[in-house]
Amino acid sequence: MLVAERHRKIVELVQSEGRIRVAELSKLFQVTEETIRRDLDKLEAEGKVIRTHGGAVAREELPLEVPFEDRKIERIEQKKAIALKAVRLVESGDCISLDASTTAWQMARILPDIPLTVVTNSVKVVMELRNKENIQVISVGGVLVPRSLSFVGPLAERSVEGYHVQKSFLSCQGLHLQYGLSEATEEQARVKEKMIRNCDKTILLIDSSKFGVRAFAPITDLSDIDTIITDDEVDPSIIESLREVQIKVITAEV
């Protein structure tokens, strides 16, 4: 079979099935998995499919932003363990930013009531911190996204740019060693990118399921990340690769 014909059939399969894995395509076309990966990379470059960890999805099957109420119960023990490690990096007098992730919300829940300034685009974080008298909370404005209870858009981006913080704590939909950090929507990606640009240190809070994932909207390269806090289910080879590029990795036991 000619390469062009294989590519055409791959696109048809992805469109009909919604998503498909490299191993399945390798068996179907009787070529190596490496050949299929190259095929998918080319098809993604042409805008015909979206690469995922281990396969591809149709462009119309891209995941929407998952509602906050659904996200807050996903891998809850991992998120709590990660949040506990993150809180230990906060010092009295710090100015920090927290994104609208459920892990950042878990972190807000256990932040001690010490002198802090917290900049956030999360409604849930604001509500969690409202009774902590020593914490000054700055909520950015913008367009409210009901699904994630977060503010996004140009106003939110400008608001984040208006504050310099020592530490930014945020999460993302995917971390890929080659493609960096990514999010489900461009709006969330832009707000997170502004948070990263306006802090001294970026601390990424992600559980092991996010590694190897390339979501729809790029946020930034790995070179902009100082520390990653994750759970103890991450492949050790990935941790080693991150440390080789001078990223500190903290693992939380679950």
Image: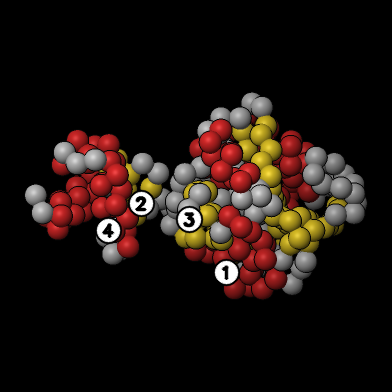
Q: Residue drawn at (32%, 55%), measured in percent from left and top?
A: 41
Assess disc 3: are there few (<14), some (14-19) or many (≥20) residues with their C-alpha within 10 Å of its C-alpha: some
Q: Is residue 113 above or below residue 182?
A: above
Q: Residue drawn at (56%, 33%), measured in percent from left and top?
A: 236
The mark nearer the N terminus, 4 or 2, is: 4
- Which of label 3 and label 1 is nearer to you? 3
User: From the viewer's perspective, is 141 left or right of 235?
Assistant: right
Query: Residue 153, which numbered label?
Result: 1
Say what secondary structure mark 4 lies in.
helix
Query: Residue 51, which numbered label?
Result: 2
Q: CA distance from mark 4 to mark 1?
A: 31 Å
Quadrant location of the C terminus?
top right
Q: CA distance from mark 3 to mark 2?
A: 11 Å
- What amino acid type should be assigned to the residue bearing mark 1? Gly
- What amino acid type should be assigned to the residue bearing mark 2? Arg
Say what secondary structure mark 3 lies in.
loop
**Residue 28 figure quarter:** top left
Assess disc 2: are there few (<14), some (14-19) or many (≥20) residues with their C-alpha within 10 Å of its C-alpha: many
Q: Position of residue 38 (x, y in %)?
A: 29, 52
Q: Which residue is mark 3?
A: 179
Q: Which residue is mark 4?
A: 43
- Which of label 4 and label 1 is nearer to you? 4
